[in-house]
Amino acid sequence: MGSRKKNTADKRKEDNKQRAFARLRNCPTSPRKMRLVADQVRGIQVDKALQLLKFSPKEASGRLEKLLLSALANWQVKNESERIEDHDLIVTEIFVDSARQLKRFRPAPQGRAHRIRKRSNHITLVVGDSIKKELEKA
């Protein structure tokens, strides 16, 4: 491995120590409905995001709340010596991708059949320190 490649790999590893990932695969909610909730959470502090998800009436918010708690647990495992309360953690990235579709048929008038697509999605959530603290370190 060349020195330049090694340096960039080491830098990427250092950056990933401050970030924690959580993924939810094949969630049986349409991506469009999940993105409505994900857009509310993107870029805000973790404690505010948890409160927002807890009291949201949308069905997708329960699944997203559980995923956010998983990301926090992953961050805690990566940074065992540090406390979550001491850091200003935010939801740095969250994206919702389309997953498989279950295709079904529903009877329609005059002997026809209409196709029903039951959509699902993949969610990736990244939790990290706020940008302000990263600028202060540099």
Image (tube, grey):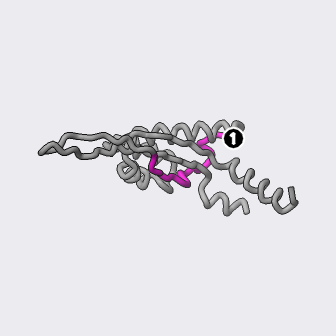
Identify the image quadrant of the N terminus.
bottom right
At mark 1, the secondary structure is loop
Indicate the position of residue 2 as horizontal and vertical percent values. 87, 59
Q: Amino acid at mark 1?
A: Asn
- Residue segment shown in magenta: 83-99
- Queried whether the magenta region covers residue 72, the answer comes back as no
> In which quadrant of the rendered view does residue 117 lie?
top left
Instruction: Assign the magenta stretch its main secondary structure.
Output: strand
Total number of numbered discs in the rendering: 1
Quick one: 46 or 63, which is closer to the camera? Answer: 63
Q: Name the residue tied to disc 1.
A: 79
Quick one: 123 or 109, which is closer to the camera? Answer: 109
Residue at 45% across, 50% down: 98
Residue at 78% across, 59% down: 8
Indicate the position of residue 88 as horizontal and vertical percent values. 58, 50
Identify the image quadrant of the C terminus.
bottom right
Q: Is residue 4 above or below residue 44?
A: below
Indicate the position of residue 84 as horizontal and vertical percent values. 61, 42
Residue at 69% across, 40% down: 79
Q: Is residue 107 above or below residue 34?
A: above
| Residue 108 relative to residue 88: left or right | left
- Queried whether the magenta region covers residue 91, the answer comes back as yes
Indicate the position of residue 103 as horizontal and vertical percent values. 34, 42
